[in-house]
Amino acid sequence: MQSAERLCGIVGIAVMALGAGATRAATQSVFGVTPDGQVVKQYRLTNARGTEAMVITLGATLRSLEVHDRNGKATDVVLGYDTLEEYLDGRWYLGATIGRYANRIANAEFAIDGNTYRLSANNGANSLHGGVKGFDRAVWVADGSDGSAADSVRLKYVSPDGEEGYPGRLTVWVTYALTNANELKIRYQANSSATTIVNLTNHTYFNLGGSGDGEVLQERLMVAADTFTPVNGDLIPTGQIQPVADTDYDFRAPTELGSRLAAAG
């Protein structure tokens, strides 16, 4: 656990490098209005090679990512909905920012400094992806860009002390940046008013053949990881760290997804 002012993380998603060039400014539009009157905006990020990312402020969500294949054909490789109503009704976290805590917390409780904090249980007895109203259900606000040459948008959300049972007033920033090297980078930063736990991530589903274009079983995946964290029957990490060698989780070399899923049954 880390104390206030020192909670941050960075993750990068490479999208197919195509070269460099000048960048264009992000543009915004209204994506919809929630039943309680909050305006949800959409931000369009582009680069010099025609790659385009759409980000909406509901859940700081990556709604689409359009890239070009070797023949110049544009394809949206991210699964997303067409309307705000579908996002409000959806339960699959498509493209959303997950928090305060990604994954499951057993029995919806944890302890810090001898104090036990009880969370909202939304996955049986456990808390999943931040609880009943995680960060994916919040409407974020634009808060500038990352100041780099990349086309970017920075979104902010303030989670009140005690929201979903978590201690501390947590201010979170998520920055999406689309570079001219065709990298989509996501940067997370969070400051807390009290000692707390936080585990942020993005929940995008990808299909490199294009959204709705068949299965992903033939796609090849590489993960530079020598170990993994096993889970129990409720998908809660056991606390063990085991090597991926000789398991279905070994993606240290490019491996077809279907071969691993078939082996796993």
Image: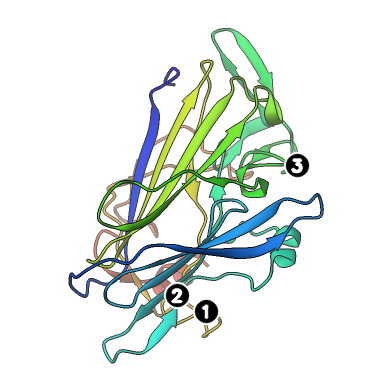
Q: CA distance from mark 2 to mark 3?
A: 32 Å
In the rendered image, which residue does mark 3 sit on? 124
Task: Residue at 43%, 82% (x, y): give it.
Answer: 75
Of mark 2 and mark 3, the one earlier in the sequence is 2
Vertical relation: 69 (above or below) 190: below
- What's the residue at 32%, 67% (across, down)? 24
What kind of element bears circle 1?
A: loop
**Which residue in the protein does label 2 denote?**
77
At label 2, the amino acid type is: Val
- Residue 235: percent from left, percent from top: 59, 45
Secondary element at image label 3: loop
Q: Is residue 157 left or right of residue 185?
A: right
Where does the image place residue 158, in percent across and percent down from the top left?
Answer: 59, 33
Q: Are marks 2 and 1 in contact (CB under 8 Å)?
A: yes
Q: Position of residue 217 (x, y in %)?
A: 45, 77
Check disc 1: other Cα within 10 Å, few if <14, some if 14-19, many if 20+: some
The type of residue carrying mark 1 is Ser
Q: What amino acid is labelled 3 in the image?
A: Gly
Assign the N terminus to one quadrant of the image: top left
Q: Residue furthest left?
A: 20
Q: Residue at label 1?
A: 211
Structural distance between the alpha carbons of marks 1 and 3: 31 Å
